[in-house]
Amino acid sequence: MRSVCWKLHLFPLAIFAAIACVCICGCSRKGPMFPLDNPTPRADVHSYANPAEWKATRVFLDLDVDFNRKVIRGTALLDLDRGPGSPAPAVVLDTRALKIEKAEWSADSAAGKWNVAKFSVGASDPILGAPLRVEIPPEARAVRIAYESSPGAVALQWLEPAQTTGKKQPFLFSQSQAIQARSWIPLQDSPGIRVTYGAKIRVPGQLRAVMSANTNPFAEDAGGIMLDASTREFHFEQPKPIPSYLIALAVGDLVFANLDPRGGKEGRTGVYAEPSVLPAASKEFTDTEKMVEAVEARFGPYRWGRYDLLVLPPSFPFGGMENPCLTFATPTVIAGDKSLVSLVAHELAHSWSGNLVTNATWRDFWLNEGFTTYIERRILEDIYGKERADMEAVLGYRTLLDELNRLPEKDEILYVDLKGRDPDDGFTEVPYEKGALFLRTLESVVGREKFDHFLRAYFEENAFQSITTQDFLEKLETALFRPDPALESKVPVLQWITQPGVPEGAAIPKSALLDHAAAAAESFAEGKSSASSISFKTWSTQEQLYFLRSLPKSLDAAKMAALDEAFGLTRSGNAEVVAEWLLMAVRNRYAPANPRLERFLVEVGRRKFIKPLYEELVKTPEGRERAAAIYAKARPGYHPMAVATVDGILNPAGK
């Protein structure tokens, strides 16, 4: 009885202590657990648009593609929602080097009655372009702009037949991210503004147009409608609201192959490419449907209808672009052994992180790329095994460390301040790899099952919305940290988001296979083993890359020659491996690789590869001279974004 009475005596005290603890730990906290110091987090500093007053909800394009003049000409119709309160006297759109010919407004675009509107184009900013101000009355619900793009539109690359694989037909493709959609469409060019879109696109009769829309490649009109002997018209519809940077167009000599294992007209995955590229592409990407199913099983249904890939000419400046329903991809990922299809996994993952749930501003870019890089590796683990995913993660972590050594501290931050800067300045490895490492760390602390549940709910609750970093932190707090307050001491969330570097306690990836490759590199560098004794040719691409990156920066001519002779590096057909080798060749002045270097820089426009090669070349006077000579040949075949990058390397600050 004594023990019972003792417990009864203390019970009220226990209740009081518990209440006091709740008040101290919970009630004393005011505001969010993870506050950010940005009073207007949804304001997009990279857009002139006024969505609080007039917000576009749909865009309809009626365009002619003119390969002779290298322009796109036609109209853009924008349906508008009016904001609360007294309406502004004008809607403001983003443009860049567009020729605006006419503006109209309508109270009902479906009725077909249009009224001439006064318009003005403001002064042009080198980063933002120029605002287009269209005066409209309160009853307006749509504007229509007649316009023409510039031959130098930064989003568009016009390729002559000789610059394509087939050498017979010209090619056009767009690249609208981050703020380049305004160079070929007058619109509200902000990731925080989502629109549905439709299009009528007229092209030369022998070509095929494709867009980031849910197009059935097996439909009767999939090949377009012949208007006359020389013109073909294609119709597109994207019923899901997307940000402007995901509106995409490509026109060329394109054919299609089904990737779905069921064959025939079943399924939802396929690939477009030039005829000579299609066989290799369709073989390389056979696991695409498996990848879609793997993400669905973990993070919810694929909501975009079809998932197709478009293999572009090698001048495409990126590895891939996650345009909804139609990923744009570089041909440099076609290695013949599926060793580089992590790119497909990455772009597919964007169908959830980026396309479904989008960063509201470019300061929040890590919400797109950090989540996508994390999910990419989950896909690889499901399809190819944990070791493959771990190798990719280790390579990514090493790339991140190299990037952190190069960047100023202000750019090591996930929530990077880009005010007054080009949003492309934020497209470093930090949002990708540091963002993914942050999520990997959260997973390691809370457990995979719980973290998967959190991510699935996150995509479901925020589907077809654009959110800020603060929005994410509030959801993280509500779903994971409030129910388990101990997590706050295990994961320094604000340090991850707002401070440079990698916080202590990060879930650093490891790979035994890559450790072995690094040991082999050390043994060779120290002269303890010969190149011929290393099983380089039997290794995966990831092991080969890690071996090369683990070698000393400086190697003598004999060691460079030994590596080349043993592994055939100068002749390698794997773009990732040969790019790494050529970087080593430039750094160590290995002359036998010079012809391949020139050929590679002329044929390939992917910025990931060409940027470090030019940067290494210009470190010496003779290298700068070679770089200039090569660039004179390569420049006409580069995308405008790649041109801007290399121009900046060879002619910094316009000198």
Image: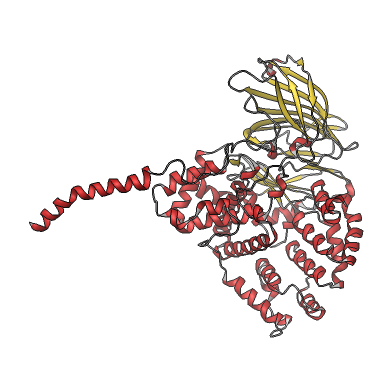
Instruction: Work out whether residue 62 or residue 80 is closer to the camera in this orientation and state it.
Output: 80
Residue 604 lies in quadrant = bottom right
Find residue 632 and report its horizontal and vertical position in percent. 91, 55
Picture layout, residue 236 above or below residue 497: above
Which residue is found at the position 62% from the left and 50% from the top? 369
Would residue 217 appear left or right of 22 to someone viewing this image? right
Which residue is situated farthest in the bottom direction here?
528
Instruction: Work out whether residue 588 or residue 500 is closer to the camera in this orientation and state it.
Output: 500
| Residue 606 appears in view | yes
Which residue is found at the position 80% from the left and 67% from the top? 582
Picture layout, residue 536 above or below residue 40: below
The image's colouring method is secondary structure
Find residue 613 and report its horizontal and vertical position in percent. 80, 62
Picture layout, residue 214 above or below residue 642: above
| Residue 262 appears in view | no
Image label count: 0
Find residue 1 and report its horizontal and vertical position in percent. 7, 56
Residue 400 lies in quadrant = bottom right
Picture layout, residue 636 above or below residue 543: above
Find residue 311 and report its horizontal and vertical position in percent. 74, 49
Instruction: Work out whether residue 536 or residue 587 is closer to the camera in this orientation and state it.
Output: 587
Residue 555 lies in quadrant = bottom right
Which residue is found at the position 72% from the left and 74% from the top? 552
Instruction: Work out whether residue 113 or residue 370 is closer to the camera in this orientation and state it.
Output: 370
